[in-house]
Image: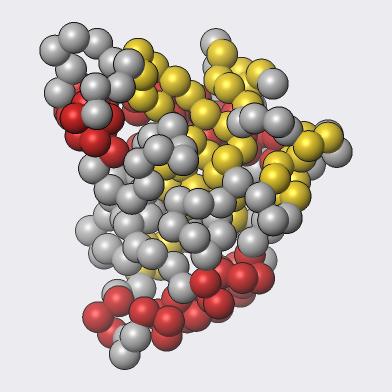
Amino acid sequence: MLASGRGSNLQALIAARDAGQLPVDFVLVGSDKAGAGALDLARDAGIPTFTLNPKDFPSRQAYDFELFRRLDASGADMLVLAGFMRIIDGEALKPWVGRMVNIHPSLLPKYRGLHTHRRALEAGDAEHGASVHYVTAELDGGPVIAQARIAIQPGDDEHALAQRLLAHEHQLLPAVLRLVAAQRLALLPPDGVALDGRALAAPLQLRNGELVD
């Protein structure tokens, strides 16, 4: 996993693993921020960590190639981006396409990039949500695997909306990774997702902690 912040999604994944609900091994957690809370969570769980400072590299591409060199060396089969606040070079990530997912706090294709809660509120949307998608060179533009939806309530502000959504993110990401671990999901180039060998017509939806078609 790569994360830039507190690591609440990592914490949810570790909790799911420890509860016997997620049959995966975490082999490495990396960050571009030495003070990221995700690194502390990983260390407490006995997961190896590393920090790579972008300021130590002459270009974004140089940074990203070193980042993926370290990930390759870990032997990881899958990479999860959870709050990793960097745009990754398309050439660097190319070998990982199909083995790399990101969780993004909007109902993609709406609101790629930053400030998604604010933008949903400003647009007067009736609902908001989170998406897990395969990562491609297009920012937040890879095929969407699954989504969680919540109603926007009267009086919601950015903070309230973000906090309410976070609980659903913490169910959505483990649910997707359970399908990955069971080898039930696959990327269908250029922009599709397959479940059990069948192309999905629309993203899976989170219902009561489970994903439904």
Query: What is the residue that sits farthest to the bottom in this orientation?
Result: 58
Is residue 44 visible in this depiction of the protein? no
Where residue 69 appears, as percent x and y from the top left, is 55, 78
- Image quadrant of residue 91? bottom right
Determine the residue positioned at 46% across, 40% down: 109
Where residue 26 appears, as percent x and y from the top left, is 57, 50
Residue 199 relative to residue 172: left or right: right
Q: How is the image coloured?
A: secondary structure
Above or below: residue 3 compared with residue 137? above
Where residue 68 appears, as percent x and y from the top left, is 53, 73
Determine the residue positioned at 19% across, 22% down: 160
Residue 132 relative to residue 62: left or right: right
Query: What is the residue that sits farthest to the front in this orientation?
Result: 123
Is residue 187 visible in this depiction of the protein? yes
Where residue 42 appears, as percent x and y from the top left, is 42, 50
Pick the residue in front: 9 or 50.
Answer: 9
The count of marks equals 0
Above or below: residue 184 compared with residue 125? below
Determine the residue positioned at 24% across, 36% down: 119
Pick the residue in front: 7 or 150.
Answer: 150
Above or below: residue 213 compared with residue 174? above
